[in-house]
Image: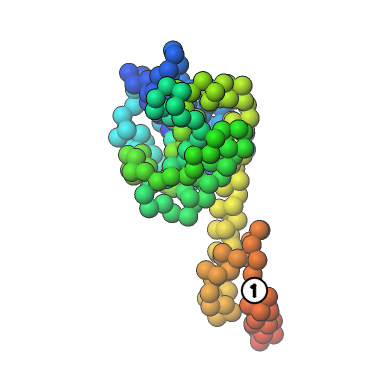
Amino acid sequence: MARLCFDYGHGGTDPGAVYIGRKEANDVLSLGRSVAEILRRHGVVVDETRTSNTTESLNARSNFENRGAYDYFISFHRNAVQPEQAAGVETYTCINPGVKSKELAAKLQSALVGVGFKDRGVKTANFYVLRKTKAPAVLIEIGFIDNSLDNALFDSKRAEIVQAIAGAILSQLRLASAKDSLKEALDVLARNGILKSPDYWLEHARTGQNANGEYAGTLIERMAEYISSR
Ligand SMILES: [Zn+2]
């Protein structure tokens, strides 16, 4: 069963970014908890670094994650710079991300852009919670809290935003588990000398990709040979 660690930024004595009575800490708690609810209905375990308006240090958040064994760590934030100066979504991974966090970041970013946010891209940053967590980690900045249009989008399309984030995560969990089972099958073939480059097949033998026909032919011949020789 997939296990996720959700981290809602700020809280308690730290409201995060604030703009005209609105607090980042509240926005991300409420939105993130709705995403968690949907995922739980799909059988995903979601643990949260906070579930109400409490103060949690960055260290407490990474310690919480380090105590569990999670498939992904996802931190929810909203951006701010100067009133009404910037808009859009950004998704972050650590400076040297693995394949899984890069894939999840790309999916989250495009899902949120699909809802109507301006695309500011997937980025890397040396954020504490990305650096100190064990699981593949991403941090999403869901629009600018100091931009009235982003806030209008955040409020009017709330249900779509929640669905978009949940959908991106579910799609990544399925992709990763399909890859894991393909990897196991390729390891069996490699161990028995039927193929020599499991990494090639892991990359190409999946939905949306293409494998070289000549390589596929060789693979089929070797498998037939192996079965006949038993
Ligand atoms: Zn924040």
Give the vertical position of 154 relative to 189 (above or below).
Answer: above
Quadrant of the drawing holding the N terminus: top right
Query: Which color scheme is applied?
Result: rainbow
Could you say which is closer to the camera, residue 128 or residue 38?
128
Give the vertical position of 165 relative to 102 (above or below).
Answer: above
The secondary element bearing badge 1 is classed as loop
State the image coordinates of residue 229 (x, y, percent, origin top left).
66, 87
Is residue 122 visible to us here?
Answer: yes
Q: What amino acid is at disc 1? A: Asn
Q: Residues within 10 Å of mark 1 (few under 14, many from 20)?
A: few
Residue at image point 50% right, 35% down? 89
Is residue 78 visible to us here?
Answer: no
State the image coordinates of residue 151 (x, y, percent, origin top left).
53, 22
Residue at image point 63% right, 30% down? 160
Task: State the count of labels.
Answer: 1
State the image coordinates of residue 184 (x, y, percent, origin top left).
55, 64
Residue at image point 56% right, 45% down? 107
Residue at image point 34% right, 27% down? 56
Side (left or right) of 145 relative to 212: left
Q: Is mark 1 within 8 Å of ligand 1?
A: no
State the image coordinates of residue 83 (x, y, percent, origin top left).
42, 21
Side (left or right) of 139 relative to 164: left
* Furthest residue in direction top, as rendered: 21
Could you say which is closer to the camera, residue 130 or residue 188?
130
* Furthest residue in direction bottom, as rendered: 229
Give the vertical position of 120 relative to 55 (above or below).
Answer: below
Quadrant of the drawing holding the C terminus: bottom right
Which image quadrant shows ligand 1? top left
Side (left or right) of 66 relative to 183: left
Residue linked to disc 1: 212
